[in-house]
């Protein structure tokens, strides 16, 4: 028989290690390992996500809105400050005062309450009024529009009148004469009851005068817009006439109050 030859179990001295073989076969693996353990490598920083970009944009919008509100409020405060300074300068230079009104005389020449067959009551009245207005300012001129005058007694209208437009110069007094009348005005039951009760008073019929007009103020080259004023005169009492002679009302305790209907004056050049 022929003898069989078996290979030796000892490793050959020239054999290569498996890792070295893999490294030689794929050099990229060694490069990756070197990069992973490189101490000089820049650390990884993830890029911002869409959520973070949205939050950043929302913060910018909020910041812009706050800045707009801040500048708007600051502008309003500056305007108010400049207006206050201008008002103070105007007051120091001109020292403006309201016009003054006073009642000189009031005569009741006619006052009749008549009841017809249909049980309605009619009022016919005629009053002669004289009042004065004074401009106490040294540099301001008042230009008055036509004046409307109403005489009342406890909210019941007695007569109406008017006076044409006029100009009141500085430190000037203007006398106003006006005739107030009411012809056959129908009154309700409450108004009739109120008037009959007032006619029985010893002091006479209480009369209140309402004077409404518009005024333009001038000073040097400045001119204001029309400003509404209402003058309320109270403390007047007068008896009704007995016969053809007019009855003279008592005006010694009359006081007139001037109220502005527009509080803010807008000046134009």
Image (tube, grey):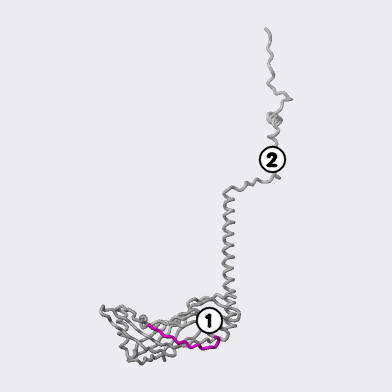
Q: Which image quarter is the N terminus in?
A: top right
The residue at 39%/88% (across/down) is: 236
Discs 2/1, front = 1
SS at badge 2:
helix
The residue at 53%/83% (across/down) is: 167
**Which mark identifies residue 84?**
none
SS at badge 1:
strand
Residue 216: % across, % down: 53, 79
Q: Quadrant of residue 257?
A: bottom left
Q: Is residue 233 above or below residue 31?
A: below
Residue 23: % across, % down: 70, 31
| Residue behind mark 2 | 35
The residue at 45%/80% (across/down) is: 212
Q: Are marks 2 and 1 in contact (CB under 8 Å)?
A: no
> Which residues are the magenta region?
169-181
Decide which of 26, 47 is in the foreground and name it: 47
Dot placed on the residue nearer the N-terminal end, 2 or 1: 2
Decide which of 200, 39 is in the foreground and name it: 200
Which residue, as the protein is rendered here, is positioned at the far top?
1
Decide which of 136, 180 is in the foreground and name it: 180
| Residue behind mark 1 | 143
Q: Quadrant of residue 106?
A: bottom left
Mark-to-mark CA distance, 2 and 1: 96 Å
94 in the magenta segment: no
């Amino acid at each position: 028989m022929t003898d069989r030859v078996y290979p030796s179990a000892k490793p050959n001295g020239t054999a290569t290690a498996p890792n070295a073989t893999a490294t030689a076969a794929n050099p990229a693996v060694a490069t990756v390992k070197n990069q992973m353990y490189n101490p000089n490598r820049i650390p990884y920083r993830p890029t911002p996500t869409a959520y973070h970009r949205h939050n950043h944009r929302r913060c910018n919008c909020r910041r812009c809105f706050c800045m707009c509100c801040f500048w708007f409020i600051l502008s309003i405060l500056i305007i108010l400050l400049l207006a206050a300074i201008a008002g103070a300068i105007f007051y120091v230079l001109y020292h403006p005062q309201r016009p003054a009104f006073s009642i000189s005389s009031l005569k009741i020449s006619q006052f009749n309450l008549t009841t017809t067959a249909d049980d309605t009551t009619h009022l016919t009245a005629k009053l002669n009024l004289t009042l004065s207005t004074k401009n106490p300012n040294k540099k301001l001129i008042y230009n008055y529009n036509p004046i409307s005058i109403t005489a009342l007694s406890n909210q019941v209208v007695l007569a109406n009148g008017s006076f044409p437009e006029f100009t009141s110069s500085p430190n000037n007094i203007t006398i106003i004469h006006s005739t107030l009348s009411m012809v056959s005005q129908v009154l309700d039951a409450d108004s009739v009851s109120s008037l009959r009760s007032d006619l029985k008073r010893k002091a006479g019929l209480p009369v209140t005068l309402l004077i409404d007009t518009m005024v333009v103020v001038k000073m040097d080259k400045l001119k204001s817009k029309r400003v509404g004023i209402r003058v309320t005169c109270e403390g007047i009492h007068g008896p009704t006439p007995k016969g053809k002679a007019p009855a003279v009302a008592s005006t010694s305790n009359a006081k007139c109050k001037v109220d502005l209907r527009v509080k803010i004056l807008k000046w134009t050049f």
